[in-house]
Amino acid sequence: KVFCAGANIKDLVELNHEKLIIQDIFKDLCNTINSVRKPIIVAVNKLALGGGLEIALLCDVMLLAEDANIGLPEIKLGVMPGIGGTLISKIIGKSNAMKMVLTGETISAKRALELGIASEVHKPEELHAKQLELAEKMAKFSLYTLATAKTAVKFSFENPSTQAMEFERRTFDGLLNLPGAKEGLPAFVAKRTPDFKGK
């Protein structure tokens, strides 16, 4: 019915600081999503609140249904985002992030698109078809290149520009020895469609 309305609050009531020091329940989730080399396209229908939005933000591309609402309402429970929600400031700027985190208000899909949180908004009945369409578009390219480009974009997002540019150049250089470039560049010169399957 909804993408994810957030963590089970009953479970959080049982947690305390001591327990979280020993078993960092959120770390495993973050590490699992961050370790996926293939592009992750998330399609959010109806709601993505709290931990639900944070999971969506960990993905690479976010699509929203027109009737979706997203938010970080943890402040209303006496807590704050704990799975990376505050990193939304890197996408929407400090002032907008402060408003979302410090008021707990939800925003519409249209506003999320305006702020750059989502890349596309679709009619609810078309959302998953559009998700698959985008996945199929990406899947036509070299898997090696997709994984490498994803890593470079993530590095650029998380590091200063000078380091990011250096990383990008070194990563680009390495691609020239991989199957994607060995297929794609000669195909362009020969004026034929590249076949990236398995490359």
Image (cartoon, helix red, strand yellow):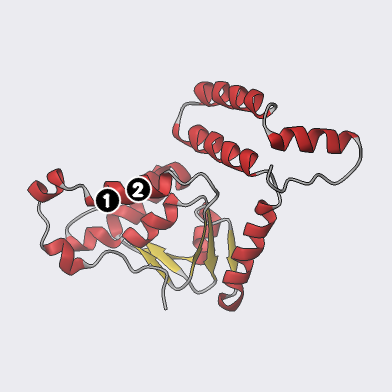
Residue 55 at x, y percent in the picture: 39, 56
Position in image of residue 49 (x %, y %): 35, 64
Location of residue 106 (image quadrant): bottom left
Amino acid under disc 2: Cys
Residue 95 seen by the camera = no
Which of the 4 image quadrants contains residue 50? bottom left
Task: Find disc 1 in the rendering and name its residue.
Answer: 26
> Label 2: which residue?
30
Q: Nearer the viewer, residue 35 or 15?
A: 35
**Three-letter residue code for mark 1:** Phe
Give the left or right position of residue 116, taking residue 56 as reference. Answer: right
| Residue drawn at point x = 73 percent, y = 33 percent | 181
- Residue in front for this viewpoint, 71 or 153: 153
Q: Is residue 128 visible?
A: yes
Residue at position x 72%, y 48% in the image: 197
Vertical arrangement, residue 161 with respect to residue 133, above or below: above
Residue 199, by quadrant, is top right
Residue visible at 50% across and 38% down?
Answer: 154
Query: In the visual, does 162 lie left or right of 1?
Result: right
Tell me the residue at 53%/37% (across/down): 151
Quadrant containing the N terminus is: bottom left
Residue 166, percent from left and from top? 56, 21
Do the residues bearing badges 1 and 2 touch, measured as CB atoms within 8 Å?
yes
Q: Nearer the viewer, residue 138 or 87?
A: 138
Judged from the image, the secondary structure of the residue bearing numbered disc 2 is helix
